[in-house]
Amino acid sequence: MKLPVIEPLADGHARRIKYLRVSLTDRCNYRCAYCMPGEEIQFLPRAQILRFEEIDRLVRLFVGLGVRRVRLTGGEPTVRAGVVDLVAMLGQIRTEEGEPLQLVMTSNGHLLPRLAAPLAAAGLQAINVSLDTLEPVRFRQITGRGDLAAVIAGIEAARAAGLGLKINTVALRGINEGEIGPLCRFAWSRGAVPRFIEHMPMSDGMIYDVSRELPAAEIRGIVERDTGATLEPAPHAGVAGPARYWQLGDGSGREVGIISAMTEHFCADCNRVRLTAAGDLHACLGYDDALNLRDALRSGASDDDLRAAIRAALAGKRMGHEFQRTGLGAPSKHMISIGG
């Protein structure tokens, strides 16, 4: 169904909101140290999780407000039962221009060997797969219970299904900085774009360690030394989004993306908001304040009521986060519950 734009959604700083990240669940089959603060975390009761028809309704409202890209996240989105059915529902949405919604996902890849093809057939267009190391023992240490062979098989399945592919790596000093070059080559050999993410202080800073920080500039230097080529801003480097893209100056067309929340801020052109599995709308990753849309939905709010609430919430979106290298300024929310 084609959805007309009533009035494009913008925040109080006149930044157009075109990108919505939707967490499908706060559960995950992995236990990555930089994402989940220990095994004692309390997961949401299932009754508090948005139902598929609620997600569909909210996504349609956001598309009607000018959102053009929706990323499905978690936790781990593929552990949500019926995820292929939800993708098929969202895949029916059309923009004011009659174009399909840009529907993408971030996943740890573990279940992609059996889900990549059905997800692509249902309407998923691209997927980012988390891969922090190519060493099996180190992979197990980082992920807590991960299976490197399953993730690599999932990447191959996504590639075979024709999904656009990016490889996400949280860059951690003393853990995987020696693998930046190999991870780039792994991604490039599969037609994927490698992306490196600076470690961010979430969970009240309890799982953040500044000694693990690997700044964007250092990551670029490692890539240049490894490839022997100078990195230059990619043609789309200025496109609003969390990553900044660089291409090798050797004419190969190979690119690398870096999400530099700590050392090279990108807040000025932020175009995204986040919806948790419980229906909390977060205007910024760096703050805990949120608007609960689930309760409004279940109390009978009209579409006009919901649009007005969304606009009011976004009017207060801050110009940027206040992450500190000390861990101060960290929100109490967990990365696993917001999907990054």
Image (spheres, grey):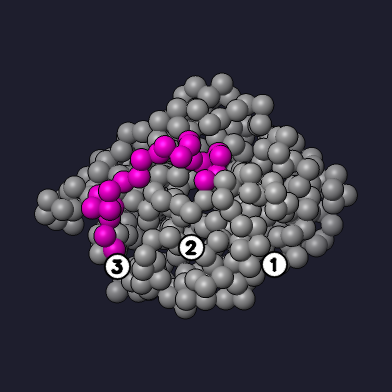
Residue 178 within the segment the image draws in magenta:
no
Contact between labelled residues 3 and 2, with CB atoms less than 8 Å apart? no
Where does residue 83 sit, x and y in percent of width and height? 39, 66
Where does residue 201 sit, x and y in percent of width and height? 52, 31
115 relative to 235 in the view: left or right: left
Separation of disc 1 and disc 3 at Cα?
Answer: 34 Å
Query: Which residue is denoted by mark 3 in the rendering?
Result: 3
Query: What residue type is disc 2 on?
Result: Val
Badge 2 element? strand
Residue 36 in sight here: yes
Magenta span: 31-52
Badge 3 element? loop
Q: Residue at x 15, y 53 (%)?
A: 298
Query: Which residue is denoted by mark 2 in the rendering?
Result: 104
Contact between labelled residues 3 and 1, with CB atoms less than 8 Å apart? no
Where does residue 81 sit, x and y in percent of width and height? 37, 65
Q: Outermost residue, left direction?
A: 300
| Mark 3 closeness class: few <14, some 14–19, many ≥20 residues within 10 Å | some
Q: Residue at x 52, y 50 (%)?
A: 30
Q: Residue at x 55, y 61 (%)?
A: 110
211 relative to 226 in the view: left or right: left
Q: Residue at x 58, y 47 (%)?
A: 143
134 relative to 331 in the view: left or right: right
Q: Outermost residue, right direction?
A: 228
Q: Within the image, what quadrant is residue 194 found in?
A: bottom right
In the picture, the disc for residue 258 is: none
Whichever of callouts 2 and 1 sits on the residue coming sooner in the sequence is 2
Query: Which residue is denoted by mark 1 in the rendering?
Result: 191
Query: What residue type is disc 3 on?
Result: Leu
**Helix, strand or loop for the magenta stretch, by majority:** loop
Separation of disc 2 and disc 1 at Cα?
Answer: 17 Å
Whichever of callouts 1 and 3 sits on the residue coming sooner in the sequence is 3
